[in-house]
Image (cartoon, grey):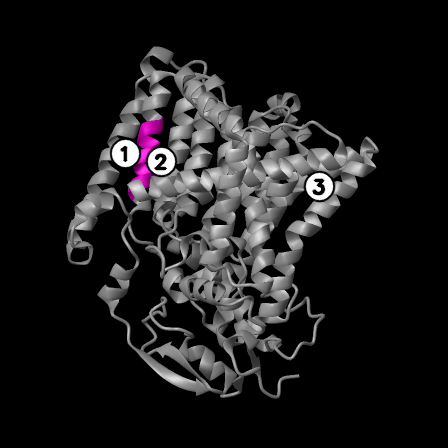
Amino acid sequence: MLGIIIFWVFLILTFLCWGNILTFFWNKALKRNDKFDFFDTFWMGLCVVGVLAMFISIFYPLNFNILLLFTAITLFYWLYNRKGFISLCKKGGLEFKKLSVQTKVSLIFVILIIVLWAIIYPRGSDTGLYHLQTMVWAEKFAVVPGLGNLHGRLAFNPSSLVLSTLFSYHPNYFPVFYPINSLCFFIFFIWLFFTLEKYHIFIRYLLVIGLFVFIVSAYGTLISSVSTDMLPNIIICYLLLRSIIDKHYFSKILPIVTISVFCITAKLSAIAITLLALYIVIQQVRQKNYKVIWAIIFLSIITILPWCIRNIIQSGYLIYPFPSIDIFSFDWKIPIDSVQAEKDSIYNWGKVRMHNEMVSQMSFAEWFPIWFNNLNKYNLGIFLAALISPFIILLNLKKLKKQPIIFFTYCIAVIGVISCFFSAPDIRFGWGFFIMAGFIPLLLLNYKFLDKRFLINIPILLFFVFFILHFSSNYCQMMREQVMIGKPYLLLYKPQRYDYLKMLENPTFSTVSVGNQEIYYPSTAEQLCYDACFPCTIEDRLEMTKGKLEMRGKTLQDGFRIRDFK
């Protein structure tokens, strides 16, 4: 627990450092005097570090030396800017003092609940399937040509995994744990509680607490993981809600453009959020601020470019897995039928939790009932809330005329929902859009008839009950896993390591020779690679290549290709 909080502080200072550096260069280039608050600076800094890490990874592995470099720059910056650091601490303390007792109590519960989730080992099969292997490759090597030929999912290229590798995966130097998702979750809800202090008591507490409880219940297991779904969906929620709450937010060009464009590199299905940046561009065109427009274009290209280069090197495609964008002919290029199979696999799994080719031939009327029946209670609630949201909007058209920004952000959420639903209909991939589509219309409803005096203690009671339930369930889970934990009190200062799960499952591996390299694969289909051995793939991938997988050179850095592929 203590280890997580210390690492949070380090990451916050790092991201604030780079966010301030970006702001400095933006103002210098455009001769502006833009100033941004703690939260925008944090998110911009995260984006800058993500982009820099992707650039560095093209030429150099993201090893411990690179982490030391970022640490040194951060320390130098804050030593140079000591007054800024002191001012930041004082301002944070003053803002906390201004909060009501109810909000302070709620924030304490928020921190405790998030930390409780953050200290347990990562849940989710994708961590063992390919996340850990991806981070091993990134920590040991620069981007490897044709890596997707070894395992199709190793060519997936989310910037969130690059960030996690840089800050989290250095097993030779410190225990591996993943604080970025939990930190972003924490920052998002801290912002909500601080910002919504000015709202009506019901909106301020009950809606926000309801949102927190719902997201934690539905996706709390992702908080301690390197899940690539958490970061982009938190960003979606932040940008949409901030655009509604802050009436002057669209005058803040830099954070909207930087954060929304970077979100694509974290999850391509989040592309609808860039409509916020497009709106900014349209505003600037109308005002004939061509210098700002060129700055936006340059910033967007710089943000996207390293992500595209990594895609090309790892897969041979500009965007992977999208076989329709087929413009390169490198020798390491993944065969197009394999790319199509990977794309179909994502889509089919989202529909009916199966990778069977028959799923691709199902009509909407055939797969939708299966998909609907497979929804858990949380995803069902998210889907139904998004489904009935248009009716709430129609009933509040008069209010929308006075608050057009609510309608604009709602439309972005709906576009995101439609895009996610018909590209990969797993709500987990786009829960930010689904939740916002259901949540935003609630801000239009009238709650003035409710008794403030009666409601004032409800939020604290809800939080208390929810906290006790979560603490109890986590504690019972830990006791059931006592063989793995050994000494539960150690969790007070360090998170539970993923090694415990590997020890429990104890996977076994077989090998196959590819050139001068032994490639591992799990002995049974139910087992996962984790980072138990390296390099590792799955038997299905080896069968798909039909013995034509070969190394491009003498070392793993040279990459892989498919023999006789044209």
- The magenta span reads 107-116
| Label 2 element class | helix
Out of 114 and 208, give the one closest to the viewer. 114
Mark 3 or mark 2, whichever is nearer to me: 3
Distance between the alpha carbons at the discs numbered 1 and 2: 8 Å
| Label 1 element class | helix
Q: Residue at x 32, y 55 (%)?
A: 175
Q: Residue at x 66, y 30 (%)?
A: 250
Name the residue type under label 3.
Leu
- Disc 1, disc 2: CB below 8 Å? yes
Q: Which residue is mark 2?
A: 213
When the figure is inspected, residue 434 is found, relative to residue 467, above or below; the finding is: below
Residue 269 is at least partly visible in this image: no
| Label 3 element class | helix
When the figure is inspected, residue 311 is found, relative to residue 35, above or below; the finding is: below
Find residue 134 and report its horizontal and vertical position in percent: 46, 64
Q: Is residue 111 part of the magenta span, yes or no?
A: yes
Distance between the alpha carbons at the discs numbered 3 and 1: 40 Å
The numbered mark at residue 466 is: 1
Name the residue type under label 1.
Phe
Query: In the figure, residue 536 lies in which quadrant?
Result: bottom left
